[in-house]
């Protein structure tokens, strides 16, 4: 049935593609290992390489044969021409018209043959490109069947056989230059692998007799991930390793969960590791951690181990000692800072705290304190950004450690760490604010040292000579101000004549001056008459007022009668 569906998918029809997808989803529970192998053989990139190599070889043979034939023909033509010239013993001028026509025909035939050969090469190249595109389109359709199988049968043991083929497809696709169609194929395969296989909540929980095979697969994947050059491909290999660990651990039985809740034992689920060989797996991941901390250029990253510590606290407890040692022994300053981050994430986990309760937790805090002291002692006078980032991560771990020791009142000697922290201010120039400074004072605060307060002093503003020379807005300079004129002193005769003129005009002389001010005529205010007088005045108006009122009324009527002009 699977072979029939694969043959139908080779046809360029969307309807047939949808029908094949529907039919395969219905027969998924009955798919065997042989049928799944037939699907994976279509997607195998090694077969494509073999086909391409065969095509290239045949093309090279053809081209070689053509080149040899052309060289032989050219040599024969040269021989014929030379023989003709020697036999005739004549020059080009002595050739008759028939010989010239034959030569033209031969040249025309030669050029036409070369043109046909070039066109044949071009047609063959376009044909190969079309065939390659059809093969890639066929593989994208086959991925539909694989996606349906992973979605419907995620808990089947057959899914474990998809890990390596999908990783091979991703690795080959990432390492080679590809066009848009191949990128779509690669993106589709990566999405099926990471999102629908590795991150699926449904997975194979019954390993059966495949424990040794899966442990070997895990070791193979981790060994390959350390040898890669591309960090993005290494991420897929590490995700596959975590998926294999999840399958090996499995899930506790339902009866065991009920007993654990009845007894109140919350740590039983954390200690459950199923079919996982904890010592062997921990050794594999410790080697990977040492590779990451000991190599200057490693495809592994701290985020990968952080995911491992978060998802599997049991393995985290086994790897903590190795991570603590790398706080001081990392090959670079960057690796030392990343080791601090890993230890901090592990110690902040509640699951790890439950697994390491009591004397084990106290011993771990003592080891971390000693490594932090040794790491901070190495910090010298520097302004390097990388060193400051490492110091920040170290201080964050110090803050958690000191706070935890003080709260739980553990018997851990923190005096060497306190001494190193006090001398750190002389090695690194602290600013007023910043992440480094704030973290440092937060750590030292647990030892009773408070950040000194700095009084804010406003700097005195010095008057600039340029500002003094500037003119104030809204004020006239002294040169343009109006000067007070001196008041002229009049002679007695002139003063008397001016006084007479002013008296005739009705003015009065100003006090203490020789000038006369003009007296403005003011209308006298009319007193309001009594009620009786007002009524009499209204009854008998004066003739002057009457005439005035009549004239005003006539003018108003004239204004009203005036027609409006049309626009």
Image: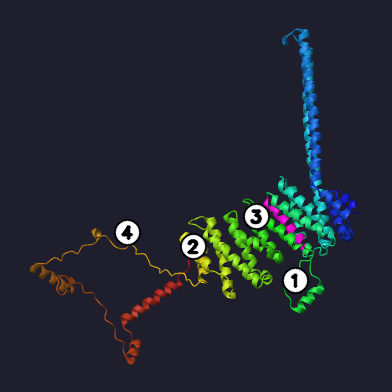
Q: Earlier in the sequence, mark 1 or mark 3?
A: 1
Residue in the foreground of this view, choosing between 442 and 56: 442
Image coordinates for residue 363, horizontal then vertical, percent: 62, 68
Image coordinates for residue 290, horizontal then vertical, percent: 66, 56
Q: Earlier in the sequence, mark 4 or mark 2?
A: 2
According to the image, label 4 marks what residue?
464
Residue 473 belongs to magenta span = no
Tell whether label 1 touches label 4 (CB within 8 Å): no
Q: Quadrant of residue 371?
A: bottom right
Distance of label 4 from label 1 (alpha carbons): 76 Å
Q: Residues within 10 Å of mark 4 (few under 14, many from 20)?
A: few
Q: Nearer the viewer, mark 4 or mark 3?
A: 3
Tell whether label 3 touches label 4 (CB within 8 Å): no
Q: Residue furthest bottom?
A: 532
Distance of label 4 from label 3 (alpha carbons): 61 Å
Q: Residues within 10 Å of mark 1 (few under 14, many from 20)?
A: few
Under tag 4, what secondary structure? loop
According to the image, label 2 marks what residue?
424
Query: At 29% from the left edge and 86% from the top edge, which residue is drawn?
Result: 527
Tell whether label 1 touches label 2 (CB within 8 Å): no
According to the image, label 1 marks what residue?
269
Residue in the foreground of this view, choosing between 303 and 410: 410
Q: Report whether 218 appears left or right of 470.
A: right
Q: Is residue 17 above or below residue 396?
A: above
Residue 238 belongs to magenta span = yes
- The rendered magenta stretch, by its main secondary structure, is classed as helix
Residue 148 in sight: no
According to the image, label 3 marks what residue?
292
């Amino acid at each position: 049935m699977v072979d029939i569906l694969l043959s139908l998918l080779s046809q360029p029809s969307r309807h047939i593609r949808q029908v094949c997808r529907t039919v395969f989803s219905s027969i998924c529970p009955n798919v065997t290992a042989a049928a799944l192998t037939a699907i994976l053989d279509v997607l195998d990139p090694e077969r494509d390489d073999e086909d391409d190599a065969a095509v290239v070889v045949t093309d090279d043979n053809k081209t070689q044969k053509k080149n040899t034939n052309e060289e032989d023909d050219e040599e024969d033509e040269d021989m014929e021409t030379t023989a003709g010239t020697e036999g005739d013993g004549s020059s080009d001028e002595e050739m008759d018209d028939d010989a010239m026509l034959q030569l033209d025909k031969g040249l025309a035939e030669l050029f036409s043959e070369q043109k046909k050969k070039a066109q044949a090469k071009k047609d063959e190249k376009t044909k190969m490109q079309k065939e390659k595109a059809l093969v890639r389109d066929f593989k994208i359709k086959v991925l539909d069947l694989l996606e349906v199988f992973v979605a419907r049968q995620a808990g089947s043991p057959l899914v474990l056989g998809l890990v390596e083929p999908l990783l091979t497809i991703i690795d080959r696709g990432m390492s080679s230059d590809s066009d848009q169609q191949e990128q779509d194929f690669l993106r589709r395969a990566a999405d099926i692998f990471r999102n629908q296989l590795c991150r699926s909540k449904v997975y194979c929980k019954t390993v059966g007799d495949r424990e040794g095979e899966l442990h070997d697969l895990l070791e193979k994947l981790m060994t390959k991930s350390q040898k890669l050059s591309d960090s993005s491909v290494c991420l897929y290999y590490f995700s596959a390793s975590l998926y294999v660990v999840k399958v090996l651990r499995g899930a506790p039985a339902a009866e065991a969960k009920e007993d654990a809740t009845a007894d109140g034992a919350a740590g039983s689920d954390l200690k459950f590791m199923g079919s996982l060989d904890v010592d062997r797996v921990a050794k594999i991941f410790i080697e990977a951690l040492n590779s990451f901390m000991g190599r200057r250029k490693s495809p592994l990253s701290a985020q990968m181990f952080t995911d491992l510590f978060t998802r599997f606290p049991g393995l985290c407890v086994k790897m903590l000692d190795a991570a603590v040692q790398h706080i001081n022994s990392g090959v670079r300053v960057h690796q030392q800072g990343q080791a601090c981050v890993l230890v901090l994430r592990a110690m902040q986990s509640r699951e790890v705290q439950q697994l390491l309760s009591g004397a084990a937790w106290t011993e771990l805090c003592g080891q971390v304190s000693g490594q932090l002291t040794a790491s901070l002692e190495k910090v010298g006078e520097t302004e390097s950004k990388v060193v400051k980032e490492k110091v920040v991560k170290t201080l964050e771990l110090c803050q958690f450690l000191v706070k935890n020791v003080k709260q739980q009142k553990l018997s851990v000697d923190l005096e060497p760490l306190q001494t190193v922290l006090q001398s750190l201010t002389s090695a690194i120039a602290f600013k007023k604010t910043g992440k480094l400074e704030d973290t440092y004072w937060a750590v030292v605060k647990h030892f009773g040292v408070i950040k000194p307060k700095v009084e804010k002093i406003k700097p005195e503003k010095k008057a600039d000579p340029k500002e003094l020379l500037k003119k104030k807005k809204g004020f006239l300079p002294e040169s343009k101000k109006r000067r007070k004129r001196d008041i002229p002193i009049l002679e007695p005769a002139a003063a008397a004549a001016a006084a007479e003129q002013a008296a005739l005009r009705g003015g009065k002389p100003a006090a203490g001056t020789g000038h006369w001010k003009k007296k403005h005529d003011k209308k006298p205010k009319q007193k309001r008459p009594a009620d009786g007088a007002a009524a009499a005045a209204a009854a008998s108006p004066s003739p002057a007022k009457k005439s005035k009122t009549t004239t005003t009324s006539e003018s108003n009527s004239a204004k009203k009668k005036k027609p409006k002009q049309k626009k």
